[in-house]
Structure formats: structure tokens, C-alpha cells
Image (spheres, rainbow, N blue to C red):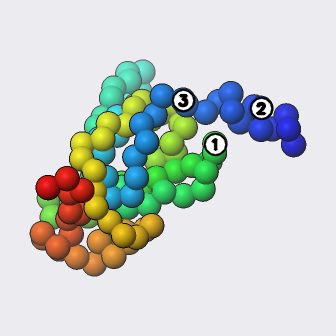
Amino acid sequence: MDALKIIEQGSMKSELPKFEIGDTVKVHVRIREGAKERIQIFEGAVIAKKHGGINESFTVRRISHGVGVERVFPLHSPSVEKVDIVRAGKVRRAKLYYLRDRVGKAAKVKSKYN
């Protein structure tokens, strides 16, 4: 069991920023198309964080052309290049699944710093 923890710690990323639920983030994702690789930026609000350690993942939601788009990213995946925090959100919940039912301005997260 101790050997698994050592392997787990060795493959975890150490330079990721500390973001919370409700924060608006830009996730730089490495996309492979055939033999080429490029970086795609996915910007949205973090609505959930799950698990912990090497299995930690987070869900980012955004509205694209009037349609809600959610992506789940494994935090320590090599395809996640980096995560930039755009602004901090003021929330009182651990999961923001209620944003799925809201439209327009009601679907936005308030900023922590006014």
C-alpha cells in the first residue's frame, strides 16, 4: 500500500493553482489530430470537484451558442497542460449542478471581489 502512495505522488502535478468551486478558469488542453498536436483553451465555471489525490477531477461548464457544454478533466492528466484562474467565484455549495437549470444571467456565478 505504501508503494502505491509513492508511485501516486511521483506522477502527480505539483505546479497546479489552487482553484475552488465557482471559480472561472481557463483549461489548456492538449488535442491530438492525426500527427499534429495543438493546445485548445476551454473557459468556464468550475461546478464540481471529485475524488482526491491522483484520481482528482473537476467539471467545467460554459455556454456555447446558447447550449450548455460541460467537460470533465482529470486534474493530473498529461493532456491538461495548465489551468489559469480568471476570477474567483462566491458560492455556498460544494456542487453547482443547479446552474444546469438556469438560463441567461441567472446561470452566472457572482464574483468574490466586487
Identify the residue shown where x is 53% and y is 37%.
Answer: 77
Q: Amino acid at mark 1?
A: Ile
Question: Could you tell me which secondary element the residue under label 1 belongs to?
Answer: helix
- Earlier in the chain: of badge 1 and badge 2, it is 2
Within 10 angstroms of label 3, few (less than 14), some, or many (20 or more) residues?
few
Q: Quadrant of residue 4?
A: top right
Identify the residue shown where x is 45% and y is 67%.
Answer: 94
- Earlier in the chain: of badge 3 and badge 1, it is 3
Q: CA distance from mark 1 to mark 2?
A: 11 Å
**Residue with the mark numbered 1:** 54
Name the mark on residue 77: none
Kindly check if marks 1 and 2 are in contact, taking CB atoms under 8 A apart as contact. Answer: no
Q: Where's residue 108, x and y in %?
A: 20, 65
Kindly check if marks 2 and 3 are in contact, taking CB atoms under 8 A apart as contact. Answer: no
Can you see residue 56? yes
Against 93, is 49 above or below? above
Q: Amino acid at mark 3?
A: Ser
Question: Could you tell me which secondary element the residue under label 2 belongs to?
Answer: helix
Question: Could you tell me which secondary element the residue under label 3 belongs to?
Answer: loop
Within 10 angstroms of label 2, few (less than 14), some, or many (20 or more) residues?
few
Q: Amino acid at mark 2?
A: Ile
**Residue with the mark numbered 2:** 6
**Residue with the mark numbered 3:** 14
Q: CA distance from mark 3 to mark 1?
A: 11 Å
Closer to viewer: mark 3 or mark 1: 3
Q: Where's residue 85, x and y in %?
A: 30, 41
Against 104, is 39 above or below? above
Q: In this rendering, would 2 be left or right of 55?
A: right
